[in-house]
Image (cartoon, rainbow, N blue to C red):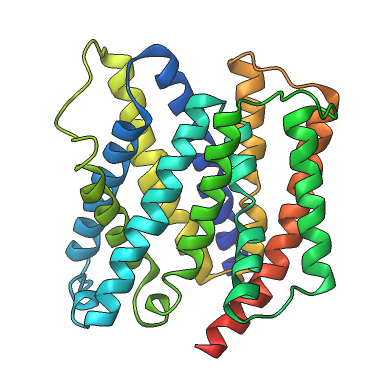
């Protein structure tokens, strides 16, 4: 029975991560085919997926409004939606827009490194040697990825690099901000409201009703897949996997996102990487796995202190 539950968790986490990777590639295709902006697309995917997720939870008997009863929890939820989910999602799509769907998730996966740094700052304690070592490996891998080993030349757009690092900071934010909420409420409820709040906020910048012109059936189909498969299903499956797996294992399976995105961009979009860049990507993914193992321990320590 235990092995069956673990297998189910592995399936959910793996499929969710793969769907995240596919959605990034589809977003790159959409940006190349149309005038859709990253801001409008993130608004569409967050608003629609958040509302549908809350609607589904409400239909299945979940009290989705109870999370709004306490003032302190309301503030945490709003911060999670804006500074966590919205910031991470919008930065990620801008990294795809200015770079590609392979590099963006690798840069975003540096999130655990920023969690380690944040925990050290919050508790005014230096990271331990393993934390420091894994972070240095991660930075070295990113260096190889963006420079191909040549310090005088960037092989990745500076804007892609900037927004990719911002998305990693966003990942750290939505990892740490809802930690108290997750003790009291369903993870899907927290994520549903986070997506919805982020989508509502994004409407002030890029209103969802200002639909881009000259979209055909294929463009609309791609957007539907991004919203429902690459966002709604991906989030639901990945979060649900935590009912069966330790967070560290779920995070490790999350590296399937950049791996899948790289395979798809090279195979179908004609992106090319130099050997040193591929080595850099591999080193970064290895560091990400180590970072996720360490972050799980730090996250537990953080939860106990709160």
Q: Residue 194, position in %: x, y?
A: 32, 59
Seen at 31% across and 45% down, the residue is: 46
Point out the residue furthest to the front here.
152
| Image height of 13 relative to 124, above or below | above
Q: Would you say 81 lies left or right of 116 here?
A: left
Q: Quadrant of residue 158?
A: top right
Location of the N terminus by quadrant is bottom right
Q: Residue 79, position in %: x, y?
A: 34, 64
Q: Quadrant of residue 66?
A: bottom left
Whether residue 295 is visible here, answered yes or no, is yes
| Image height of 259 relative to 6, above or below | above
Whether residue 12 is visible here, answered yes or no, is no
Seen at 74% across and 41% down, the residue is: 142
Seen at 63% across and 33% down, the residue is: 103
Total number of numbered labels? 0
Q: Would you say 257 lies left or right of 293 here?
A: left
Q: Quadrant of residue 145?
A: top right
Q: Residue 268, position in %: x, y?
A: 59, 16
């Amino acid at each position: 029975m235990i092995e069956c539950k673990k297998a189910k968790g592995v399936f959910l986490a793996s499929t969710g991560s793969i769907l995240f990777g596919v959605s990034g590639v589809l977003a790159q295709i959409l940006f190349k085919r149309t005038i859709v902006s990253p801001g409008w697309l993130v608004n569409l995917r967050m608003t629609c997926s958040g509302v549908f997720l809350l609607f589904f939870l409400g239909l299945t008997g979940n009290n989705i409004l109870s999370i709004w009863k306490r003032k302190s929890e309301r503030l945490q939820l709003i911060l999670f939606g804006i500074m966590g989910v919205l910031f991470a999602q919008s930065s990620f799509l801008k990294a795809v827009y200015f770079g590609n769907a392979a590099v963006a998730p690798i840069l975003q996966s540096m999130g655990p490194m920023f969690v380690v740094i944040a925990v050290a700052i919050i508790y005014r304690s230096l990271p331990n040697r393993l934390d420091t070592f894994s972070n240095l490996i991660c930075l070295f891998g990113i260096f190889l990825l963006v420079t191909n080993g040549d310090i005088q030349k960037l092989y990745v757009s500076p804007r892609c690099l900037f927004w990719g690092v911002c998305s990693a900071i966003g990942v750290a934010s939505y990892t740490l901000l809802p930690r108290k909420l997750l003790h009291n409420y369903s993870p899907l409820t927290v994520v549903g409201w986070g997506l919805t709040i982020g989508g509502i906020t994004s409407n002030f910048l890029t209103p969802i009703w200002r639909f881009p012109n000259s979209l055909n059936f294929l463009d609309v189909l791609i957007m539907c897949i991004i919203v429902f498969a690459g966002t709604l299903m991906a989030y639901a499956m990945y979060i649900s996997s935590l009912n069966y797996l330790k967070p560290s294992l779920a995070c490790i399976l999350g590296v399937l996102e950049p791996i899948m995105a790289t395979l798809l961009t090279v195979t179908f979009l004609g992106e090319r990487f130099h050997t040193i860049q591929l080595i850099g990507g591999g080193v970064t993914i290895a560091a990400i796995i180590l970072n996720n193992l360490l972050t799980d321990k730090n996250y537990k320590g953080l939860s106990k202190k709160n």
